[in-house]
Amino acid sequence: MMKSLLVFIVTTSLLLVQPSWAFITPPQQQHSVTITTQRMMGWFDGISKAFANDEYGPPPDKVSATARHILVKSENKAKDIKKQLQTGSSEFASLAQEYSTCPSGKKGGSLGSFSPGTMVPAFDKAIFSPDAKVGEIIGPIETEFGYHLILVDKRTGGGDWY
């Protein structure tokens, strides 16, 4: 505060003392400025970093899942098959071939890859639920077709919500 007041007083006093011709300024001399590539890239990097927002990366991949299932008519049958899977006495694919009433049973229950909204709502909800873990048996899930035991093999997209 004191410094700016001092500058103001000195400047005003000089204006009072100097003659009017002292305010005429000579023409400006042109200065050559050399901008190197390195300096230009530095400016570019600075500007691009100022406008970059790492919090928002590229959009996530399309959400999809790869799953297998075993479809049976009764809930009790589904629970019996699930017990066999949990004990490790049988493989998912072999049980799907043996018990599944779905045509996919011949392929070990494989449904391939699909996106949300492709399957019936209860099935979709089970597969794309954040609580469902890849590699764990889900079910039995009841749909209009019967009772499903589902094994999600893979999920892609959707960011970190799984």
Image (spheres, rainbow, N blue to C red):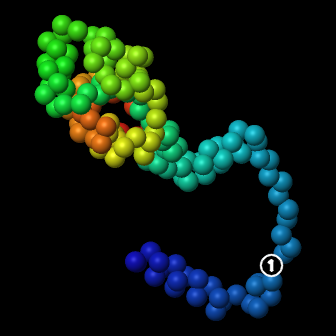
* Res. 63 image quadrant: top left
> Can you give x and y, in whole percent of width and height, for residue 53 in the image?
49, 50
Q: Nearer the viewer, residue 32 or 123?
A: 123
> Can you give x and y, in whole percent of width and height, for residue 36 in the image?
76, 42
Neighbor class of circle 1 (other Cα within 10 Å; few <14, some 14-19, many 20+) is few
The residue sitting at 14% across, 12% down in the picture is 87
Give the answer, above or below, for where 88 lies relative to 16: above
Give the answer, above or below, for where 153 lies relative to 51: above
Give the answer, above or below, for where 106 lies relative to 115: above
The answer to whether residue 142 is visible is: yes
Q: Number of labelled discs?
A: 1
- Quadrant where the C terminus sits is top left
Q: Nearer the viewer, residue 162 or 70?
A: 70
Q: Nearer the viewer, residue 101 or 91?
A: 101
Kindly identify which residue carries mark 1.
25
Left or right of 27? Residue 22 is: left
The residue sitting at 28% across, 41% down in the picture is 143
The residue sitting at 17% across, 24% down in the picture is 77
- Judged from the image, the secondary structure of the residue bearing numbered disc 1 is loop
